[in-house]
Image (spheres, grey):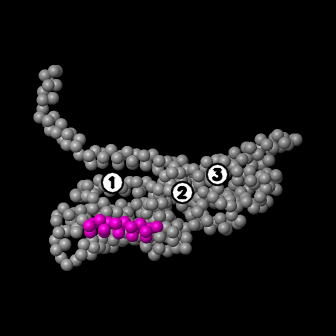
Amino acid sequence: MKRIINMILGLRIWALFWKELGQIKHDRQLIVALIMPPTLQLLLFGFALNPEVTNLRLGVVDESRTTISRELVSAFTESRAFQITNYYKSASEMSLALSAGKLDAGLVVPSDFAKEHSKGLAKVQIALDAVNSNTASIASGYAQRIINSFNEQSSQLSKKVSIDGQMPANLTSRIALLYNPGLRNSWFMITGVLGILLVMTGSLVASAAMVKEKEIGTVEQLLMTPATATEIIIAKMAPLFLLLSTDIWLALLVGWLVFDIPIRGSLILLYCAGALCVLAGIGLGTFLATFSKSQQQAQLLSFFINPPIALLSGATTPIEAMPQWLQPLTLINPVRHFATIARSVLLKGAGIEILYPNLLALLAFAIVLVGISVWRFRKQLE
């Protein structure tokens, strides 16, 4: 047995193994690439892919304005599921806020609530933004449990104060699922994943194309022409932009034919937002190419950037499920703004008068990323 062990340990492959291990030890970039990206991605997966939904934005229309109606509203706020964002004078005003994406749910307490509650016939209406079918289902369950808990507390209080011990009838609620009454999860997923695909495809294709020019040496040949470095870079970006922009129409066609996604708003507005998203992706890919000497390095860098962009976008998981400190970081993510525009245009029929902040944010991302990438690449060429 000892002879076999000595024979195995004496193989020449071990010398090569220790040599390669020594090279890896001195390659700090490789060590960082092996440690940092997996660690950060595990943390992001743990925080972002959280099925628990808390702090849903709740709007309230309290037409009763009585003690019992305030107790019902307090029952919603005492739970961690809902957080009151605003009080509204009418249901139509609250409906506009739901359409604009300012609320996740709305509670309407009618004017005769106290009178009907004393008779055991009280009803309230709960409206949910069902664009995210998963969040709407969870929120519906939360609301029903809050109503049941409110009924139990009212029954116990009635037993204490009532002479004959009679219990009032339960409070009932009517839940309305807006914009996605069938709770089809595919509507939410496709309108979000589209933005991820545009940015990721744009960054991967642009970085590969730019780095390939470096590897085969055609960049030097182009610099010998009368064209400037800026003209060369823009000329390389333009065809990529035109080709990737067609993916927007292809994705819409697939979503409409296969998943029956409705188109309730302006396709021109959606295409403009998608085009800006493509530009942001191309700018990001070109920027990564300036730090890469080979296509393999560019791909590794993209794996470090693209997963956080996908996870912190709200495209596949609700932003409300993320920790409070992590949610502001999603505002610097172009995919989040495009997902908001896509869902609002296709499912809600919203227009530019509501979505202009997200459109301006996409425009800013496109200008900044393309501008920085062109500056970096031109500096290297010169």
Numbered disc 3: secondary structure: helix
**Amino acid type, label 1:** Phe
Residue 87 visible in this rendered orientation of the protein: yes
Tell whether label 3 touches label 2 (CB within 8 Å). no
**Amino acid type, label 2:** Ser
Q: Nearer the viewer, residue 302 or 139?
A: 302
**Number of other residues with Cα within 10 Å of mark 3, as a class: few under 14, some 14 to 19, many 20 or more:** many
Residue 303 - label: 1
Q: Nearer the viewer, residue 30 or 261?
A: 30
Tell me where the magenta segment starts and ends, as one range.
361-379
Earlier sequence position, callout 1 versus callout 3: 3
**Number of other residues with Cα within 10 Å of mark 1, as a class: few under 14, some 14 to 19, many 20 or more:** some
Q: Nearer the viewer, residue 352 or 173?
A: 352
For this view, does 340 lie left or right of residue 284?
Answer: right
Numbered disc 2: secondary structure: helix
Q: CA distance from mark 2 to mark 3?
A: 15 Å
Rendered residue at 47%/56% (across/down)? 329
Image depth: mark 1 or mark 3 in front: 1
For this view, does 99 lie left or right of residue 331?
Answer: right
Furthest toward the top, the residue is: 1
Rendered residue at 43%/63% (across/down)? 334
**Number of other residues with Cα within 10 Å of mark 2, as a class: few under 14, some 14 to 19, many 20 or more:** many
Dividing the picture into quadrants, the one containing residue 295 is bottom left
For this view, does 1 lie left or right of residue 128?
Answer: left
Give the main secondary structure of the magenta stretch: helix
Q: CA distance from mark 2 to mark 1?
A: 29 Å
Residue 104 - label: none
The residue singled out by tag 3 in the image is 143
The residue singled out by tag 2 in the image is 133
Q: Is residue 368 magenta?
A: yes
Furthest toward the bottom, the residue is: 226
Rendered residue at 54%/57% (across/down)? 133
